[in-house]
């Protein structure tokens, strides 16, 4: 403890960037995307290279190791450490320059790859290596691991695209690495010269020749006949030799147009056998996937495995012609089907499936967990088919399963395996399997790592690949660069055992008592938290990359990403760094800015559902304690609104007086947020007062329950009335529950789950006759509809009525499509602007809404992302700034750019409220727009 306190004081005095030794900051970086976990002493976010030098000097003084970290997407454990973690994503994250003439770029280590690609794109250039994590991996991490990606068959690995590197050694030396030893500090230059001169024969003969040899140190790049390329030799050293502070990287010209040849084969082995035969025809990519990964994906020709072969050209026609040539060649070499995808949207959809594979492969089709560790071995491409067949046989002997995919054109295969890393016996069997696996790869002339590095997962097995003499040479190289052994110890040389530091070890061995059912995780909250494997898609911030994670997009802080919150929950369950369990203030603070948008439920490749985890945490965190005022004000909103409906005029008038300020303070509501107005007449009261002959008649199979959600009923009954007009015009006979019903959403979102269950059970009792009759239930408010679909059955897993109601729920557009397929909506013929509700995106889907808008002549796309209000979130005190910033990401710019006659569509009450509060536009539910047109149509025919 004394050492840590002294280290922290010294770092704060020496470093201008952020120094964080608190439990929450440490917990966020205990893991990367691997199976491993190491707890650091602290985290430093250096401001510049001088800060890095100062931090290294302090760590040398205290004899504390240092680990450099970028996006934390490494899958072999090399981005974790026990000493000080240098986080380059906060400050040293810029693309400093792009030189289109020289085709180079200058980047800092924390720069995200896609940021570089965006800045290079106007010049017709890109950075060739493109791993599937391109939206969040950093250039420093790519250089550390020698990352590759799908286009390496055309443009090579990161090592092939590095020009110069500025690094700092643990000893404090600054060095610019390129070709030759002349610019290096004398001790480093002399040491490397002696290393090469003393073992020329081994360096020339001891490395396998294959395109994806990533394992070990690339010491053969130091050979004189290879230009003594020190930058290339450093690339892939996994932060064990020096700390990168700046890089000059090469850029490549991109084709004007691209096409994708999708080639089908009977099985994975046939696809692997054929992949290398395509290379002489110059494809940009040759990626492989089998049926056990793609599932029910559409757009693929019939087969058991597929190759994605991308082609480029000066024109779309030229690219498509080259793709067709590939198809003809593939047919002669065993392909059983093919298709050419020329349109960019279709290509993006297929590539998205491939990009997400690193996450989706962690769950097998039956829901079993699968883990990395042996996910990127590489063999000579011509050996890939034979290797995969023997690999499958080895899996069979150990009773393991996995879904191989990856860079078949270069003999590199990714696979996550359902190894048991939770029990001692399972870990022992995994160790035995790893040894046999390494021998299999070496027998085929391969590399233990073909892209992701050795880290802790494979470094122990390097003697099987290289032999003991070469491994001793690696150790001598490490000693030349880092004689004190202060940089990322335990990686590559003198490594940890592959079964040490497993991240599962400190987790509870038995399920912890929880409220939700977690059906996809066997009822085990720990298993639900384990879903997050760290691929960090939630850290992407580019517009158009989905909904998650709105607060991270605003703050840029790891604790506000889905991964960061999952990591904190993991450490809460482990109890070492965060020992307070459900009372943890670190977890509470991170979840406070979770909007519960449910975006991660659909956008996260492994389906992490942070909205549910937040509700679970709040339920336990406040058990037996007084809650924040907003929980009582917003959580119990359905009850307050039911009472308020008796005197709406009085309360609306009071909301325009100074009393509103006092009321908001007492209720925990943001002072900047106007209070919504109560409707003069609730929807249900209007419904009860309708003359019986106003209801449409229809056949018996067109009867549905219209759900009178709290927001529609008490705040915007115009939505309900409009929906009735449209649905009845379509010939659907509507029923409205005779007594108040509620989905329980507001109690769920504030973690009052006991109360939510009571509300839900009462609702099921009221709806019992309708459910028995098999009537569908139409929801108008996306958040309430989504809650019925998901929260209801997950909070009442033992009540079959909950599952029945969940399966009966339809959105407004889905109901029209299913119950009145021949109905023709009125033509509106206007452009649209607005936002798809985040719960609609995540849970319900909006395909039916898109089709309905198209049929009504409502043209254009709605914004993605989240409006930022998100139910109670944007109303709560302290959230207003983040709420507005979320709206500014996509929604508000879209409104400002929309033509004046555009219809503003916002089906959610939160979205409409945010639009009204922050713009001069008024959002309307799709039902209201269609109902208006129905009225005009009736007048026209009167």
Image (tube, rainbow, N blue to C red):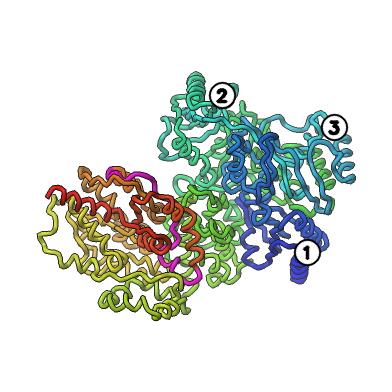
Examine the rendering and report whether any part of residue 576 can be seen: no
Q: Quadrant of the N terminus?
A: bottom right
Residue 278 numbered tag: 2
Measured from the top left, where is residue 927 in percent x and y? 27, 54
Examine the rendering and report whether any part of residue 328 can be seen: yes
The residue tagged 1 is 14
Q: Who is closer to the viewer here, 604 or 255?
A: 255
The kind of secondary structure element at disc 3 is helix
Q: Reply yes or no: does residue 872 show up in magenta.
A: yes
The residue tagged 3 is 200
Up the image or down, 871 lies above or below 212; here it is below
How many C-alpha atoms fall within 10 Å of the one at disc 1: few (<14), some, or many (≥20)? some
Nearer the viewer's eye, disc 2 or disc 1? 1
Snapshot quadrant of residue 911: bottom left
Q: Who is closer to the viewer here, 712 or 78?
A: 712
Nearer the viewer's eye, disc 1 or disc 3? 1
Q: Who is closer to the viewer here, 483 or 43?
A: 43
| Residue stretch in magenta | 855-878
The kind of secondary structure element at disc 1 is helix
Up the image or down, 688 lies above or below 429; here it is below
Q: Who is closer to the viewer here, 585 or 323?
A: 323
How many C-alpha atoms fall within 10 Å of the one at disc 2: few (<14), some, or many (≥20)? some
């Amino acid at each position: 403890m004394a050492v840590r306190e002294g280290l922290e004081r010294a770092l704060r005095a020496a470093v201008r960037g952020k120094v964080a030794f608190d439990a929450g900051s440490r917990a966020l970086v205990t893991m990367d995307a691997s199976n491993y976990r190491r707890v650091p002493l602290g985290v430093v976010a250096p401001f510049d290279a001088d800060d890095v030098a100062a931090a290294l000097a302090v760590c040398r003084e205290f004899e504390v190791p240092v680990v450099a970290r970028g996006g934390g997407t490494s899958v072999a454990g090399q981005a974790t450490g026990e000493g000080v973690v240098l986080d380059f994503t906060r400050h040293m994250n810029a693309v400093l320059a792009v030189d289109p003439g020289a085709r180079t770029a200058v980047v800092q280590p924390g720069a995200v790859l896609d940021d570089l690609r965006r800045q290079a794109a106007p010049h017709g250039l890109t950075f060739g290596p493109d791993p599937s994590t391109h939206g969040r991996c950093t250039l420093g991490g790519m250089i550390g691991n020698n990352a590759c990606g799908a286009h390496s068959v055309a443009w090579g690995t990161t090592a092939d695209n590095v020009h110069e590197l500025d690094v700092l050694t643990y000893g404090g030396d600054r060095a610019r690495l390129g070709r030759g030893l002349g610019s290096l500090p004398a001790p480093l230059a002399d040491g490397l010269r002696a290393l090469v001169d003393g073992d020329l024969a081994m360096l020339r003969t001891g490395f396998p020749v294959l395109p994806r040899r990533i394992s070990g140190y690339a010491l053969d790049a130091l050979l004189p006949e290879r230009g003594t390329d020190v930058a290339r030799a450093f690339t892939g050293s996994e932060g064990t030799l020096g700390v990168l502070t700046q890089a000059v990287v090469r850029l490549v010209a991109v084709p004007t147009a691209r096409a994708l040849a999708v080639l089908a084969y009977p099985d994975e082995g046939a696809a692997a056998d054929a992949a290398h035969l395509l290379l002489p025809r110059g494809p940009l990519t040759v990626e492989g996937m089998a049926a056990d990964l793609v599932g029910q994906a559409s757009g693929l020709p019939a087969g058991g495995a597929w190759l994605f072969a991308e082609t480029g050209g000066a024109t779309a026609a030229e690219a498509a012609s080259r793709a067709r040539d590939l198809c003809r060649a593939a047919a002669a070499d065993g392909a059983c089907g093919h298709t050419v995808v020329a349109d960019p949207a279709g290509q993006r959809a297929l590539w998205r499936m491939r990009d997400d594979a690193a996450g989706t492969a962690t769950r097998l089709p039956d829901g079993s967990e699968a883990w990395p560790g042996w996910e990127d071995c590489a063999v000579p491409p011509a050996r890939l088919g034979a290797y995969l067949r023997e690999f499958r046989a080895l899996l069979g002997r150990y009773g393991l399963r996995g879904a191989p995919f990856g860079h078949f054109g270069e003999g590199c295969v990714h696979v996550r395996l359902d190894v048991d890393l939770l029990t001692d016996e399972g870990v022992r069997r995994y160790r035995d399997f790893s040894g046999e696996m390494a021998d299999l790869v070496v027998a085929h002339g391969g590399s233990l790592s073909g892209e992701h590095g050795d880290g802790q997962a494979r470094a122990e097995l390097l003697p099987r690949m290289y032999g003991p003499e070469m491994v001793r040479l690696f150790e001598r190289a490490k000693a030349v660069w880092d004689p004190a052994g202060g940089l990322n110890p335990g990686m590559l040389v003198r490594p940890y055992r592959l079964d040490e530091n497993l991240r599962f070890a400190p987790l509870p061995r038995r399920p912890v008592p929880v409220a939700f059912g977690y059906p996809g995780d066997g009822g085990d909250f720990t298993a639900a938290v384990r879903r997050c494997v760290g691929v960090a898609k939630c850290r992407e911030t580019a517009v158009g990359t989905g909904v998650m994670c709105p607060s991270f997009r605003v703050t840029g802080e790891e604790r506000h990403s889905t991964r960061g919150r999952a990591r904190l929950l993991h450490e809460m369950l482990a109890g070492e760094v965060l020992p307070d369990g459900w009372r943890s203030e670190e977890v509470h603070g991170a979840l406070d800015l979770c909007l519960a948008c449910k975006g991660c439920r659909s956008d996260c490749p492994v389906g992490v559902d942070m909205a549910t985890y937040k509700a679970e945490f709040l339920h336990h965190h406040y058990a037996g304690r007084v809650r924040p005022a907003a929980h009582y004000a917003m959580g119990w909103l359905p009850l307050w609104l039911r009472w308020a409906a008796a005197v709406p005029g009085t309360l609306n008038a009071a909301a325009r007086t100074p009393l509103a300020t006092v009321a908001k303070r007492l209720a925990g509501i943001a002072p900047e947020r106007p209070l919504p107005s109560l409707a003069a007449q609730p929807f249900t009261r209007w419904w009860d007062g309708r003359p019986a002959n106003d209801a449409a008649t229809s056949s018996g199979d067109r009867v549905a329950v219209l759900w009178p959600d709290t927001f529609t009923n008490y705040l915007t009954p115009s939505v309900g009335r409009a929906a009735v007009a449209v649905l009845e015009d379509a010939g659907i006979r509507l029923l409205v529950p005779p007594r108040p019903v509620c989905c329980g959403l507001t109690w769920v979102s504030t973690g009052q789950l006991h109360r939510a269950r009571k509300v839900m059970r009462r609702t099921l009792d009221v709806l019992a006759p309708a459910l028995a009759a098999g009537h569908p239930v139409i929801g108008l408010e996306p958040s309430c509809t989504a809650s019925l679909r998901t929260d209801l059955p997950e909070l009442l897993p033992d009540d079959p009525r909950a599952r029945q109601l969940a399966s009966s729920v339809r959105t407004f557009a889905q109901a029209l499509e299913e119950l009145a397929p021949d109905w023709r909506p009125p033509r509106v013929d206007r452009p649209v602007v607005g936002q798809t509700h985040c719960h609609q995106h995540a849970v319900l889907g909006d395909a039916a809404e898109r089709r309905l808008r198209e049929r009504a002549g409502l043209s254009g796309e709605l914004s993605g992302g989240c409006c930022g209000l998100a139910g109670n979130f944007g109303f709560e005190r302290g959230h207003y700034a983040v709420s507005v910033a979320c709206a500014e990401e996509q929604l508000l710019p879209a409104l400002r750019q929309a033509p004046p006659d555009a219809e503003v569509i916002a089906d959610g009450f939160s979205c409409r409220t945010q639009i009204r509060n922050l713009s001069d536009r008024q959002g309307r539910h799709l039902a209201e727009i269609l109902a208006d047109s129905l009225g005009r149509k009736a007048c026209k025919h009167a």
